[in-house]
Image: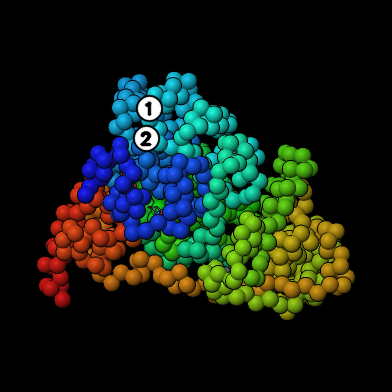
Amino acid sequence: MDFHQLSSRKPDTSDIAPETVLHEVFGYGEFRPLQGDVIHEIVAGRNALVLMPTGGGKSLCYQVPALVRPGTGVIISPLIALMQDQVAALLQLGVRAAFLNSTMDFQQARDTENALLTGELDLLYCAPERLLQPRTLELMHQASISLFAIDEAHCVSQWGHDFRADYLGLDILAREFAHVPRIALTATADERTRKEIAERLSLTEARHFISGFDRPNIQYRIAPKTNANKQLLDFIKAENQGEAGIVYCLSRNKVEATAKLLCSKGHTALPYHAGLPPEVRAENQERFLREEGVIVVATIAFGMGIDKPDVRFVAHLDLPKSLEAYYQETGRAGRDGNPSVAWMVYGLQDVIKLRQMLEGSAGNDHFKRVERQKLDAMLGLCEITTCRRQALLRYFGDTLETPCGNCDTCLIPPQTWDGSVAVQKALSCVYRTGQRFGVNYLIDVLRGSENERIRQSGHQVVSTFGIGADMSASDWKSVFRQLVANGHLRADPEGYGALQLTESCRPLLKGEVPVQLRKDPVVKAKKGTSQGSRIKEQITDQVGWDALRACRKALADEQGVPPYVIFHDTTLFEILERRPANLAELGDISGIGAAKLERYGEAFLKTLSELGSVAPQAD
Ligand code: ADP
Ligand code: ZN
C-alpha cells in the first residue's frame, strides 16, 4: 500500500492506525517513548503541550495525527526557511504539504488556498502573522482543519530570547476553533516559560508531555586553551575529517581568520557573520545544507532555523555568555541521534574579556547581576571536576542519577590538587605589585624572571619575587584562570587586563580556607564512548559507502534538496550493511517509506548491484 491509497481513504480514517502511517509514510519501525502518547492524545481530539529536546522528534507528534485525522493539519512556524525545508522533506514522503508565507506571490497563495479548501492538503505551514490576518482566519473556518500545531511555542514568552509579538494573538485559535485540537511544541526547558506558554495559549487544561533534556549522543568536552588554532585543527583532523561542523567565534575578524586557516589545511570552511552581505550568508548557509562535509565558522548569528541532522561537531573557540547559549549552540550537533562532539577550548583571556564586556555593558545593576550569575554558571561548568552532563542538566532542572560516561570529565577524570599555598602566593603577588599588572607579568615575578620591565618597576625586591619558581608558567596560568573564574580576582574595569583582588579572596590570602584546584589535563579525551562509535568508524566497505553517497548526492542535486532529505546517514549505512537484493528487502530498512522506496529504490539497488559485480575483481 502506498500513501496515495492511504490518503484516498482519508475521509473515513478510523481504520488508519498511527503505526501504519509511521511505517508506510515515514518508514520507521516504532514511535519513540513520548511520541506515541502525544499522538494518541491528539488523534483523540485533545490538546497537548509538548517539551522535547532538539532532535527528540517533535515533528512526528503533529505530522502523524494530521495524516490520521480528517482534514488539513495547520502548522504555525516562525521561521520561513525551516518551513520550506519541512515541506520539501514531506513532499519527498509523498505527503501533500504546502506553506503560506510572505515569500509567495499572489497566484501561488491563491493556489495553496484553493488546495486547502478542496481538501487536497494534508499539512499546511503558516507564519503566525499570516494566520492572524482576517482573510486567513476566514479561510480556516471554511476549510476542514484536523489540528493546529504551534511550533517553537516559547516564542509566546515575553521573557524568552525569541519573543514574537504575533504569537500572543494565537490564543484566538482556542476561542474560534474550540473543536480543533491544538498542540504546542518547544525545546525550551525552564518551568516558568512552560507555564507562560500554557497560559498564553490557553493550554492550562491540556496534558503536558515532558521528556528529559539530555542529548546522550553529544559528547561534551572542554579543555584549557593552549594554542587554540592548533587544538582545533588537531581535533578536526583526528576525529572529524570530512564531516560537517560548526565553529563558533565571538568576533567577525576571528571568524574570517579561522575560516581561512581551515581552508588552508584542506577543509571546506565558510564564514558566516552579520557583516557579510545577505546573499553571501544565504549562499554559505545553503552550501552547508546541500554539500557534505562543510564547516561553517560563525558568530552566534548562525544556527537559528538550521535543521541539518548530520552536524557531527560544534566547536567553540570563544566562551558563550551563558549555559543557555552553550546548550542551544552545542545542541545543533547530532540531531540525527548519531555520536557527535561539543568541543570547546577556553583560557584566562576569555574569562577576562567576558567579565569586562559584562561590566562595561549598558544595563542596570539588576541586569548585570543576572548576567554575572549566568557567566559564573558557564565558568563553573568549565572548571568542574565532576560529570559535565549532570551539571548541565541540573542547571536546567533535570536530573541524571549517575555520571554520564560520555563527557571529558567522565572519560578522563581530572585530578585535583591542594592549591592553598599556590593561591596564597598568587594573590599576595597581585597585592605586592599594586594590583596594576596582567597575568604574564605576575607570573614572571612569581617565577623570578630577570627582565627589563621587572627591573624598571623594582619588583625583583618584592617579597613574592621568585617564590613560585617551582611551578611552570602554564601551571601558574591555570591557577590565575581558576582564581578569575571563581571570582577571587577580577580584571581592572579600564580594560588593561590588570588583575585586582576582590572581597572574596581575603580568607584565601590569609590561608584560612584550603583550596582545591583542577589540574589541567595533558591528555585529550578519547573517542569511542558508551554511545558507540560513529558511522564512519564502522564502515568497512569504503568503496560501497562512497558509491551509495554518490548515488544519494546525484538524486539530491537533481531535485535541489540536501542529501539528508533523500536518506539520512543511518539509513544509508543500513543499506550498505544489509545489502538488500530487492525492493521488498530495501523497504524493510528504517527510514524508507513507500514513497521513497518507489522513487529511489531502483537507483540504490542498481548502485548495489554494480558494486557486487566489481567486488570480486577488487579482491
Ligand atoms: P525536533 O523537531 O524535535 O528537533 P525532529 O522532528 O526533526 O526533531 O526529529 C529528529 C530526527 O529524528 C529526524 O531526523 C526524524 O526523522 C527522526 N525521528 C523522529 N521520530 C523517529 C522515530 N520514531 N523513529 C526513527 N526516527 C525518528
Ligand atoms: Zn559525564
Question: In which quadrant will I find the C terminus?
Answer: bottom left
Q: Is residue 153 left or right of residue 498?
A: left
Tag 2: residue type?
Thr
Q: Residues within 10 Å of mark 2 (few under 14, many from 20)?
A: many
Q: Residue furthest bottom?
A: 470
- Name the residue: 52% across, 44% down: 48
Image location of residue 233, percent across then percent down: 46, 62
Image location of residue 236, percent across then percent down: 44, 63
At numbered mark 1, what does the secondary structure look like: helix, strand or loop?
A: loop
At numbered mark 2, what does the secondary structure look like: helix, strand or loop?
A: strand
Quarter assignment of residue 612: bottom left
Q: Nearer the viewer, residue 183 or 177?
A: 177
Q: How many discs mark residues in the rendered view? A: 2
Q: Which residue is mark 1?
A: 143
- Name the residue: 47% across, 72% down: 529
Q: Which residue is mark 2?
A: 72
